[in-house]
Amino acid sequence: MKANQEKKVCVITGGGSGMGLAAALQMPKDKIIIVSGRTLKKLENAVDMLTNNGQEAYAFACDTSDRENVRALAEFARTKGTITNVIHAAGMSPNMAGKAFVSAP
């Protein structure tokens, strides 16, 4: 699927709740919002809130500590338009520390 280059896309990690969702709700209504996070149900609820707020929004389950998940998120976002904003609001919990602090190849 080719991206619609006229549409501007904002990708928000940790967009299912907290600061990420608050940021999504403040984005201009002409932007497509993609909320990502690890919990699909939270993301679906966030999309409902954004849609009810008059925004075009999509959910994409993504673990930002997994390189392949992030690549898939970027590809999905590109199918919606031109990525003009990325807001990284995903948090890390202490039990994820081992995975998160592995050196990049």
Image (cartoon, grey):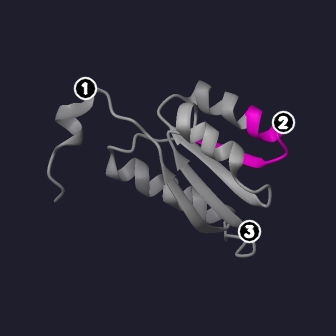
Question: Is residue 58 at all visible to an observer of this figure?
Answer: no
- Amino acid on which the number 1 mark rests in the picture: Pro
Q: Looking at the picture, how far across and down is residue 96, in whole percent?
A: 26, 30
Residue placed at 68% from the left, 28% from the top? 45
Tag nearer the camera, 2 or 3: 2
91 above or below 41? below
User: Regarding mark 1 in the picture, which secondary structure is present there?
Assistant: helix
For mark 1, what is the residue? 94
User: Regarding mark 2 in the picture, which secondary structure is present there?
Assistant: helix
Give the residues drawn in magenta, as a range. Answer: 48-60
Residue placed at 55% from the left, 40% from the top? 20
Question: Is residue 39 at all visible to an observer of this figure?
Answer: yes
104 left or right, relative to 93? left
Q: Which circle marks residue 19 in the picture?
A: none
Find the distance from the CA under tag 2 to the CA under tag 3: 20 Å
For mark 3, what is the residue? 7
Find the distance from the CA under tag 2 to the CA under tag 1: 34 Å
Q: Looking at the picture, how far across and down is residue 60, in whole percent?
A: 57, 43
62 above or below 17? below
Which of the two residues, 80 or 91, is positioned nearer the viewer here? 91
Tag nearer the camera, 1 or 3: 1
Which of the two residues, 92 or 38, is positioned nearer the viewer here? 92
For mark 2, what is the residue? 52
Q: Looking at the picture, how far across and down is residue 71, in whole percent?
A: 42, 57
Q: Is residue 57 located in the magenta-colored stretch of the structure?
A: yes
Q: Is residue 65 located in the magenta-colored stretch of the structure?
A: no
